[in-house]
Image (cartoon, rainbow, N blue to C red):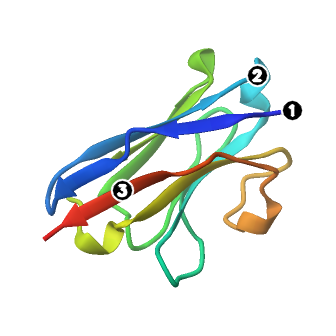
Amino acid sequence: QVQLVESGGGLVQAGGSLRLSCAASGRTFSYYAMGWFRQAPGKEREVVATINRSGGATYYADSVKGRFTISRDNAKNTVYLRMNSLKPEDTAVYYCAAEGSIMTTDPKKYDYWGQGTQVTVSS
């Protein structure tokens, strides 16, 4: 029902910035809470940030708080993740996901996932 496509990943030096975008296919985008997750090789998938349907409430993992900003533009069916002051430990595949009930940090409760975009931060 919902297709998500991430973009904006790439290779940056430590201290640099990237903005990830996640484009959704449907016109009911505003129904879904959205999340950004990441997974590094050999590690569990972890929440990065989430945002509620209206964009008025957000959550950030402690590891990215103050550096990353999640936002959404429901008119464009797009959610963004602005990443500043990137660190090598931010290197991972970043995924966006949609959840149709409540905003949650549990990846198992998300209904739809994008294909992921690679973010690599060099030292």
Depth check, front residue: 36 or 113: 113
User: Which quadrant holds residue 37?
Assistant: bottom right
Q: Nearer the viewer, mark 2 or mark 3?
A: 3
Tag 1: amino acid: Gln
Tag 2: amino acid: Gly
Q: Secondary structure at mark 1?
A: loop
Which label is found at residue 104? none
Q: Is residue 122 left or right of residue 35?
A: left
Tag 3: amino acid: Val
Query: Would residue 33 be seen by someone viewing this image from the given angle?
Result: yes
Which label is found at residue 1? 1
Disc 1 packing (10 Å; few <14; some 14–19; many ≥20): few
Compare marks 2 and 3 and give the one earlier in the sequence. 2
Q: Secondary structure at mark 2?
A: loop
Which label is found at residue 26? 2
Rendering coords of residue 20 (x, y %): 41, 41
The quarter of the picture where the C terminus appears is bottom left
Which label is found at residue 119? 3
Estimate the spatial distance between the alpha carbons at disc 2 and disc 1, rounded to whole Å: 8 Å
Report the residue at 72% width, 68% height from top. Answer: 106
Report the residue at 76% width, 38% height from top. Answer: 32
Rendering coords of residue 52 (x, y %): 66, 43
